[in-house]
């Protein structure tokens, strides 16, 4: 019987360690946990990082799992509880709203899209599962920042560069916006990330009440916003979000929250 390849065994053990431990681990922690010399552990980490399986935080130098694992495991995502519980509800939201629906989670200082339901029409669309979105400018990201202290900290540490003329970058305005999100229970992005695109998002909470993800409906500004300006104001962008869409997104997020054990709703 052929012998196992030691370097692959060590790499697999490293990935399991990062998957089951804290959000981020330092080189010393990884090396000592696996009984490896720092040089050996660093070499494996560099290889995994080059392939996208591991990512290193620029500020702390700590390591965490990379988005490439999600892309490779896309066919296996159905067993991921959050995505599995959200499948039916996000399909219903896309069908009732006529817009694209995204499910996002905090990852590496941004929002990782783990599920994407296409807009139910014949237009050409690109699957965005595995894509990263900014925390500070997207509806998904602002919801996570408002209700997850780690996301909040990540957004404050990040460079908040203007992506459009409507992007909020000043710390005072950003904090005021997050306070409004906490009060309302939802967030919006009206052409803050992409010109002509708007979105509304609400948090998904687990059985402990913690925000573990967010759901957003995204589409053209003229469809997401009320053309007569009668809807709830979003966040200072060029339009007001339709109140019926806000209600639909919040209902969807509540339904998923209930399905993963949150008894509040």
Image (cartoon, rainbow, N blue to C red):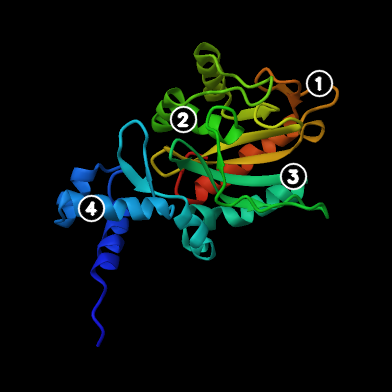
Label 4 CA crowd tier, 10 Å (few <14, some 14–19, many 20+): many
Q: Residue at x 16, y 55 (%)?
A: 36
- The reply to whether discs 1 and 2 touch (Cβ–Cβ < 8 Å) is no
Q: Which mark is residue 229?
A: 1
- The reply to whether discs 2 and 3 touch (Cβ–Cβ < 8 Å) is no
Q: State the SS at label 1.
A: loop
> In this image, 190 relative to 230: left or right?
left
N-terminal label among 1 and 4? 4
Q: Name the residue carrying label 2.
A: 147
Q: Name the residue carrying label 3.
A: 99
N-terminal label among 3 and 4? 4
Q: Residue at x 28, y 56 (%)?
A: 14
Which of the two discs, 1 and 4, sits closer to the camera?
4
C-alpha span from label 1 to label 4: 57 Å
How many marks overall? 4
C-alpha span from label 3 to label 4: 46 Å
C-alpha span from label 2 to label 3: 25 Å
Residue 192 position, x and y percent, is: 66, 26
């Amino acid at each position: 019987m052929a012998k196992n390849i030691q370097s692959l065994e060590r790499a697999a053990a490293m990935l399991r360690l990062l998957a089951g431990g804290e959000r981020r681990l330092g080189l010393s922690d990884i090396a000592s946990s696996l009984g490896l010399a720092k040089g050996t552990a660093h070499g494996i980490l560099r290889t995994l990082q080059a392939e996208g399986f591991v990512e290193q935080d620029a500020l702390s130098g700590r390591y965490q799992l990379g988005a490439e694992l999600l892309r490779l495991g896309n066919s296996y995502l159905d067993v991921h509880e959050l995505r599995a519980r959200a499948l039916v509800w996000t399909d219903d939201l896309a069908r009732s709203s006529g817009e694209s629906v995204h499910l996002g989670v905090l990852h590496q200082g941004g929002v990782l899209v783990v599920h994407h339901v296409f807009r139910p029409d014949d237009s050409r669309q690109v699957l965005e599962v595995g894509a990263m979105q900014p925390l500070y400018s997207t509806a998904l990201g602002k919801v996570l920042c408002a209700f997850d202290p780690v996301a909040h900290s990540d957004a404050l540490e990040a460079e908040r560069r203007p992506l459009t003329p409507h992007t909020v970058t000043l710390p005072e305005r950003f904090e005021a916006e997050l306070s409004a999100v906490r009060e309302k229970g939802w967030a919006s992005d009206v052409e803050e990330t992409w010109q002509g695109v708007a979105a509304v998002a609400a948090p998904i909470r687990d059985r402990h009440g913690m925000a573990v993800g967010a759901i957003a409906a995204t589409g053209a500004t003229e469809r997401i916003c009320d053309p007569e300006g009668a809807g709830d104001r979003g966040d200072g962008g060029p339009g007001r979000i339709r109140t019926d869409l806000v209600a639909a997104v919040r209902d969807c997020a509540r339904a998923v929250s209930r399905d993963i054990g949150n008894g509040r709703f």
